[in-house]
Image (cartoon, rainbow, N blue to C red):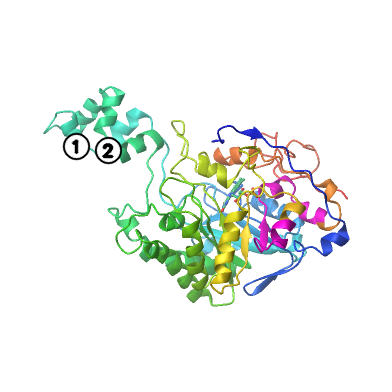
Amino acid sequence: MWTPPNRTKHPLPDTRWPTAEQAAQSRLFSPVRIGSVEAEQRTWVPAMVPWRATDDGFVTDDVVDWYRRFAEGQPGVLVVEATGIRDIPSGPLLRIGHDRFVPGLRRLADAVREASGGHTRLFIQVIDFLTIRRRPPIHKFLGRYLAITDAHRAAVGLGNATDEDVRNALAALPVDRLREALSPREAESLDYGYRERVWDTHLPHIRELPQVLPDLFADAAERAYAAGFDGVELHYAHAYTMASFLSRLNARDDGYGSTREGRVRLPVEVVERARDRVGSEPVLGARFLGDEVIEGGSDLDDATWFGVQLARAGLDYLSVSKGGKFEDAAQPKVGWSVYPYTGQSGYECMPTVYSDERGPFHRNVPLAEAVRRTLRDAGSDIPVVTSGGIGTFEEAEAVLAEDRADIVGAARATLADPDWFLKTRLGHGDQVRRCQFTNYCEALDQKHKKVTCQLWDRLELDAPDVPLDPTGRRRLVAPPWRR
Ligand SMILES: Cc1cc2nc3c(=O)[nH]c(=O)nc-3n(C[C@H](O)[C@H](O)[C@H](O)COP(=O)(O)O)c2cc1C
């Protein structure tokens, strides 16, 4: 993963945990209204993909165990991982693109309600993504994937040759000559694997995204509420389809790109369609980027403007994230896919303790703060969620007390200790197992391995009923809190 130049290792901040009385009077443990529901606390577990679904996208026992464990810590809101809105194969990622997924999701929702004693509101993040392929071996790329054009024929000086002859001639070129013979997109497909863009409007299925996506998202929202979720989070962040529509790189010329108005048009239409379908009651929010952190990408100025447009379209909350893009990702090894958290934008999304002078802690709060301020100036009072490097009560409480956000998200800190909200609220903060922010979890995610935490995945492996990974060397849920 990319780390800042001149990085230093930052120690975890010293902190004081509140007594139960102090916690009871805190902002963090005070209720917050999110559309039609009230969350009991301003604590929030952002979406995290744990790679526990079946290859067909169904909920498994491991998925249920994973969310039940988070629910035991009774966060105000728990957001289920990015869940695909299409009915297409997408590996062990949850899916919600057909009614057959509803019973499994209902089982998950029931388990969370039971394990949290009804204290946690359960939302689900719904996502669309475009095709991305693994980085191919060069012989496969030249032999099969590259579509031969007249430009290639000209480059190898074989005007009327067959495709096969051109492929052979390209394969015989020295690497730098080969690169000259390829277009920039072809060279990228060779070096990183083929990846679609929302502005590839020469491809019919990409051109039609604005016609197709509103109903797909609205259908997904309808299924989520049918399965018993309290809210739906539209995934407009990171490297995926909807964030790409919002991106300044989006050069579509069909009214869905190029200008700010064009770039926000489809995200707004998706909100409107989902609202029309489910009515005003169910909670509908979105996660989007305060800054893409890529060359030529959208910045905070775009984000504050988008925030107001999305709120006006009918959202109940906005969750502000940062970065996590493909554009600056590291080159994958042959046979691997490019991973959007390996470049600088990925670092900014999940900052580690190996950081620049600002350090990783509560690093992204200024983005949420600016989005929130602009919303308030525009007359919108929807809550804004911040996340990124927050792992103590003091940090969270300061963010809220200074009105920089309304809700505090903590993904990795809650993975490290799913009970940290509960321990803190009950005055046992000294027992919190604190995230080290080294991204062990994220490295597992990158390899599409079942996500765990280095602080607990080797503990008490032979205790009864502990779910283990296939190697038997890692447990899949955090050990229970023995009070
Ligand atoms: C293993 C893992 C999986 C993640 N999956 C998602 C996801 O599905 N959707 C999403 O919006 N963010 C995802 N994230 C990003 C987190 O929600 C969060 O924004 C990020 O970790 C920074 O917050 P933190 O410092 O509190 O961990 C993931 C993070 C991790 C570590």
Give the alpha-carbon distance from disc 1 to disc 2, as whole Å. 9 Å
Type of amino acid under label 1: Ala
Report the residue at 75% width, 64% height from top.
Answer: 27
Q: Is residue 139 above or below residue 198?
A: above
Magenta segment range?
397-424
Element class at badge 2: loop
Residue 479 position by quadrant: top right
Which label's residue is closer to the chain start, 1 or 2?
A: 1
- In depth, the one of 481 and 177 nearer the eye is 177
- Answer yes or no: is residue 102 visible: no
Count neighbours of disc 1 (C-alpha within 10 A) and say few if under 14, some if 14 to 19, many if 20 or more. few
Report the residue at 77% width, 51% height from top.
Answer: 420
Count neighbours of disc 2 (C-alpha within 10 A) and say few if under 14, some if 14 to 19, many if 20 or more. few
Q: Is residue 311 left or right of residue 75?
A: left
Marks 1 & 2, CB-CB < 8 Å contact: yes
Give the x, y percent position of residue 314.
52, 73
Give the x, y percent position of residue 242.
45, 58
Report the residue at 71% width, 50% height from top.
Answer: 414
Q: Which residue was labeled with disc 1?
A: 151
Q: Is residue 404 magenta?
A: yes
Type of amino acid under label 2: Ser
Query: How many labels were placed on the picture?
Result: 2
Q: Is residue 339 left or right of residue 474?
A: left
Q: Is mark 2 within 8 Å of ligand 1?
A: no
Q: Which residue was labeled with disc 2?
A: 183
Determine the residue located farthest toward the left in the rendered image: 160
Give the x, y percent position of residue 300.
50, 56
